[in-house]
């Protein structure tokens, strides 16, 4: 009879211990080690001294004959054909995956509760069922009736077809509905799901979610480190063997990381995060790991009444209203992966009511703001140490790259001087601690996006290389003070809209 054994596993890095510790020695995290029961076979397992592949072979391997490979290959012997992909039906989803879905891959999608992960994958499964013969949606959190209610709201599961009248012509009014190739399986037992996968052999399977699956051979509860690790490993083996693409939903912790052991992200091929404010309409699908494409790509969706809708031109979403210019705004071009996005930066500088001034950011890194404020005061002479400073990006888009530093600095100075920056000008550059403006990457891509949206002028770092025929007036600068002189008018005048204050 198998006997039970207790081990202790870290919830962060999945390190195993024979006894409990308050501090994990591998990841240096406190309070992450929990007890997990495991089953040990009576005959033992693992490494044995007397048997296995080592017995009778290892001792004589040096002098047994000519060395030759058994399974290893040289690079010249490996097939270099391009990895085949198939479209998901959503261009934004395909962009984040690197150009489409790779057969047999494992894709992990995490996000906050209620952000729309299940809605996105149900719509993707519905689109795939129109072109593929079998798609399986495993609902481990909801019953079949609940999934059907959501599907009816999203118009998923049925498709309209037109029938022909007696004359052989299609009559649009006589439309009928027929079911597509989407199968739904409400189940939490891993063994039942694996049997269904081997029997149905779908091209794509959606697992919603991995934290609710249960493997009966383990005595731990669903969502524990051992359960998540074993369930993911079993799904990976079946997916690779049967060439089934797995789209797996993962819960996140309060810190925003995917719940479960860290090994979960190492097992899968792609890790995506579905982000956004649940009270706002737009959602961002961001890639943080991709074995088949570039990381940090983003896809933008908008939550509508009929579900998630793709945003074809995201720059218009994050530009705000440029018809009414106001002090303290500037336009930057941020790059998320290979996608340039034009974003409006807003700043507000006002006298403080407290002993220490307040700093607040939305979409901009707080430490970058502190650094830019220090540079403006030390190198440019703008007195900001006793003023509150608020900086935000329109739409709440997270702009973390240094190329937005120059736009943030100009917006702060424009708010301090109560001036309006030309709304037809974009600012691109990284601000150094010495007050210089440093070069940035992908400048040509940024300038093309700005020219496409109708901007007329670009303030860029001096020495930056780009084609001459960009359709923009390029103003190269080397220091932040030069950018201030070029972007902010000394008086309330110019050939662009300005703010006219009313006299009391």
Image (spheres, rainbow, N blue to C red):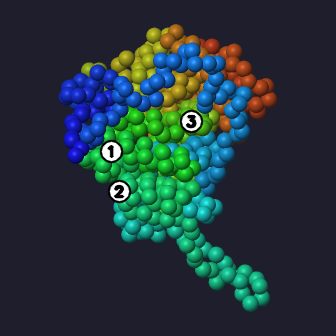
Alpha carbons under labels 2 and 1: distance apart: 11 Å
Mark 2 or mark 1, earlier in chain:
2
Mark 1 or mark 3, earlier in chain:
1
Residue at point 28%, 41% (across, down): 41
The local crowd at label 1, few if under 14, some if 14 to 19, many if 20 or more residues have their Cα within 10 Å, is many
Label drawn at residue 292: none
Mark 3 or mark 2, earlier in chain:
2
- Asked if residue 381 lies left or right of residue 430, the reply is left
> Which residue occupies the foreground of this view, 173 or 54?
54
Q: Decide: is 309 above or below 443.
A: below
> Which residue occupies the foreground of this view, 49 or 118?
49
The answer to whether marks 1 and 3 mark residues whose Cβ atoms lie closer than 8 Å is no
| Rendered location of residue 415, percent (x, y) | 48, 28
Label drawn at residue 291: 3
Which residue is tagged 2?
189
Which residue is tagged 1?
227
> Which residue occupies the foreground of this view, 71 or 375?
71
| Rendered location of residue 346, percent (x, y) | 49, 34
Position of the C terminus by quadrant: top left
């Amino acid at each position: 009879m198998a006997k039970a054994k207790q081990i202790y596993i870290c919830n962060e890095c999945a390190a195993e211990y024979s006894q409990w510790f308050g501090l994990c020695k591998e990841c240096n995290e406190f309070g992450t080690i929990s007890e997990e029961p495991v089953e040990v076979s009576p005959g033992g397992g693992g490494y044995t001294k007397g048997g296995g592949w080592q017995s009778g072979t290892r001792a004589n391997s040096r002098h047994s004959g000519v060395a030759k490979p058994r399974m290893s290959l040289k690079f010249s012997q490996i097939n270099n054909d391009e990895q085949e992909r198939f479209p998901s039906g959503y261009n934004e989803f395909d962009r984040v995956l690197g150009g489409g879905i790779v057969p047999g891959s494992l894709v992990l999608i995490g996000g906050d509760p209620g952000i729309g992960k299940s809605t996105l994958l149900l719509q993707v499964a519905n689109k795939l069922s129109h072109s593929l013969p079998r798609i399986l949606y495993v609902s481990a959190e909801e019953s079949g009736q609940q999934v059907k209610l959501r599907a009816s709201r999203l118009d998923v599961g049925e498709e309209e077809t037109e029938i022909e009248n007696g004359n052989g012509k299609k009559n649009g009014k006589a439309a009928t509905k027929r079911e597509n190739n989407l199968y739904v399986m409400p189940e939490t037992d891993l063994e039942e799901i694996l049997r269904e996968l081997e029997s149905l052999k779908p091209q794509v399977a959606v697992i919603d979610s991995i934290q609710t699956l249960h493997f009966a051979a383990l005595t731990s509860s669903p969502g524990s480190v051992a359960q998540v690790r074993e369930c993911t490993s079993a799904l990976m083996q079946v997916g690779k063997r049967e060439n089934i693409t797995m789209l797996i939903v993962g819960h996140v912790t309060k810190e925003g990381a995917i719940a479960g052991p860290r090994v979960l992200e190492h097992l899968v091929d792609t890790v995506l995060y579905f982000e956004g404010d649940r009270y706002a309409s737009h959602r961002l699908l961001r890639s943080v790991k991709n074995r088949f494409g570039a990381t940090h790509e983003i896809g933008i969706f908008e939550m509508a009444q009929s579900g998630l809708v793709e945003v074809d031109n995201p720059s218009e979403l994050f530009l705000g209203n440029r018809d009414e210019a106001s002090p303290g705004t500037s336009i930057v071009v941020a790059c998320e992966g290979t996608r340039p996005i034009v974003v409006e930066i807003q700043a507000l500088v006002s006298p403080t009511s407290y002993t220490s001034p307040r700093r607040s950011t939305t979409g901009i890194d707080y430490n970058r703001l502190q650094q830019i404020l220090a540079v403006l005061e030390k190198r440019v002479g703008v007195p900001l140490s006793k003023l509150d400073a608020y900086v935000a990006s329109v739409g709440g888009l997270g702009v973390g790259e240094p190329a937005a530093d120059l736009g943030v600095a100009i917006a702060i100075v424009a708010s301090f001087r109560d001036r309006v920056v030309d709304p037809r000008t974009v600012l691109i550059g990284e601000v150094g601690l010495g007050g210089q403006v440093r070069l940035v990457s992908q400048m040509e891509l940024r300038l093309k996006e700005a020219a496409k949206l109708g901007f007329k002028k670009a303030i860029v770092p001096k020495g930056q290389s780009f084609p001459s025929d960009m359709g923009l007036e390029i103003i190269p600068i080397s220091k932040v003070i030069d950018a201030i002189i070029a972007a902010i008018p000394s008086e309330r005048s110019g050939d662009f809209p300005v703010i006219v204050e009313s006299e009391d």
